[in-house]
Amino acid sequence: MCGIVGYIGNKNVTSVLLNGLKKLEYRGYDSAGIAILDENRISVIKTKGRLYVLEEKLKNENLNGFVGIGHTRWATHGEPNDVNSHPHISNNGKIAVVHNGIIENYLKLKDFLTGKGYVFRSETDTEVIAHLIEYNYKGDLLKAVMNTMNDVEGAYALGVVCTDFPDRFIAARKDSPLIVGIGENENFIASDIPAILEYTRDVYILEDKEIVSITAEGAEIYNLLGERVQKEIFHVDWDVSSAEKGGYEHFMMKEICEEPSVIKATISPRIQDDRIVFEKFNISDDFIRNCEKVNIIACGTAYHAGVIGKYAIEKLARIPVEVEVASEFRYRDPMVNDKQLTIVISQSGETLDTLMAMREAKKRGSLTIGIVNVAGSSIAREADNVIYTWAGPEIAVASTKAYNTQLAAVYLFALYLARARGKIDDGTYQGLLQQLQMLPQQVESVLKERENIQKFASQHFNARSVFFIGRNMDYALSMEGSLKLKEISYIHSEAYAGGELKHGTIALIEDGTLVICPLTQDYLFEKMISNIREVKARGAVVLAITAKKNEEEVRKVADEVITIPDMDPLFAPVVAVTPLQLFAYYVSVMKGNDVDKPRNLAKSVTVE
């Protein structure tokens, strides 16, 4: 959520900040600004709107300097406008701050500072930090920021410049991601790696409640006790092109087309000598055999991957699985103990609700596994075990390839559990491993038929309301398809279990209503055919997604059919979600929306 960039060195600081912020646009924002420190003066330029608005504004400014901080804001406290945009300035004009996150006790702090004579110009919680640092400042900027960190409650990543220190700036984090980029005679901070990858591949990943003083020559990291912290440099091994469009009109289409290769990257290294092997896994066979329950915790798209995981784990490993939205898990006094396994799923590894839910599960004794895409992220560092999805950078806000790889990871783990618990025979195990390894080419075959999906989207992009219905895994698949359509097309869409239609939902079906029906689970095929007949009888237009072997039968009841290869129904969601992603994409394009940066959404949700 939001983006922070900071720079000190010998380059044009304005260009570096703008370039970095452009690389963070995928995180979602509604205003942007920069602060440049030049000798004894801080120049702040900020504006509501996209970065090109800020760039136009900067053309009329003559900014010089080699130290600066920049920010893209997604409004939480106060509407999007020029005043509420970051950076924010202290009353004396000597300190500028950018901030990601939410300060939970800002009203109490604001009342305190107002009583001390401080004047507030914005509606934001962030302005409290600028004034509080000024209040705590007694000549030592690092100590002032440390004291401020002790005063504030909530989540934050901070970048701070001060006119008294033209040769450095300060950064800090708690529950909101922040990295330090290490270059030659120049150094950086950023919310995410793509912002600085053009300049350096060596980074420090800050931990919670760490603070760093950065000069052009180096970075000194401290804890809140003022003690130096020694860190290893994390070297980024993916290249700039991975975060560029590569000739595609949108990142989303590029990332959908990358699904075959990233699914292979998730699966292939883990199958060795006809067995599933996870790197650096620390779960004993004895624990697995005696495990009483698996909890899967996630948000949004990752939650839908977790629902698929529930079906797969229960079917293969015969162990109860509970899937829960992370924000609900945190606050319901969950019944978790040391005989349970908790899996948390997050593309970024920084989703705040998911991270906090994992900490809650660990506190109650549960062993934890993180399924994440980003190496070095908070969940990756704090989970007892990690399964990386290796999807590479996902820039579009609406997740596509990351979801497919999350599914691949949960299937791998389901088979791993089944084998360790003795719930699957060798023949079945080997057969399912072979099916897993065929998934990349099966997704590739679907991508070759995307013109048919585009044609159908062109006929229905003006739909007012769309319903997705499915059963079992197809219900979970419907939830993800519905979410994708909502996220980027802004069309009202709902997903329902097929059997629930007659319990109320069918009242919403009328002439011309578009209903999308996955039919990939063979043992529920006839049930779903009946559901299609039910909505068709009320005037619905039906798009069905089914295996090639069922195409002829489904065409008798559906208006349009998209086929996927014949395969084991257990793994069908990995392949069948791709047509749903493509449909959402084409509808969004035809409506003229900003596909990669849908309104009001952020890629990494690091606030509650």
Image (spheres, helix red, strand yellow):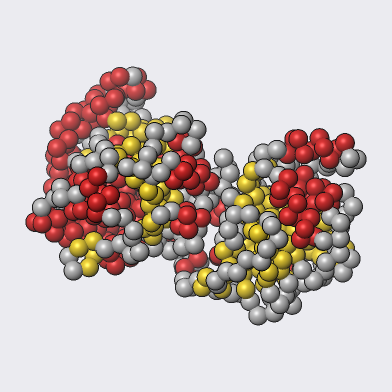
Closer-to-camera residue (116/476)? 116
Query: Can residue 394 be seen by looking at this rendering?
Result: no
Q: Residue furthest bottom?
A: 184
Residue 216: quadrant of the picture: bottom right
Q: Picture coordinates of residue 139 (x, y %)?
A: 86, 60
Left or right: where does residue 6 sit relative to residue 402? right
Q: Residue at x 63, y 76 (%)?
A: 183
Q: Is residue 416 above or below residue 169?
A: above
Left or right: where does residue 160 sit relative to residue 366? right
Considering the image in quadrants, where does the C terminus appear? Answer: top right
Q: Picture coordinates of residue 218 (x, y %)?
A: 68, 74
Q: Residue at x 15, y 41 (%)?
A: 522
Q: Is residue 11 above or below residue 538?
A: below
Left or right: where does residue 131 sit relative to residue 485? right
Q: Picture coordinates of residue 566 (x, y %)?
A: 16, 51
Q: Residue at x 48, y 37 (%)?
A: 330
Closer-to-camera residue (149/600)? 149
Query: Can residue 322 be seen by looking at this rendering?
Result: yes
Closer-to-camera residue (147/206)? 147
Q: Picture coordinates of residue 570 (x, y %)?
A: 20, 47
Q: Residue at x 45, y 39 (%)?
A: 326
**Number of numbered labels in the structure image:** 0
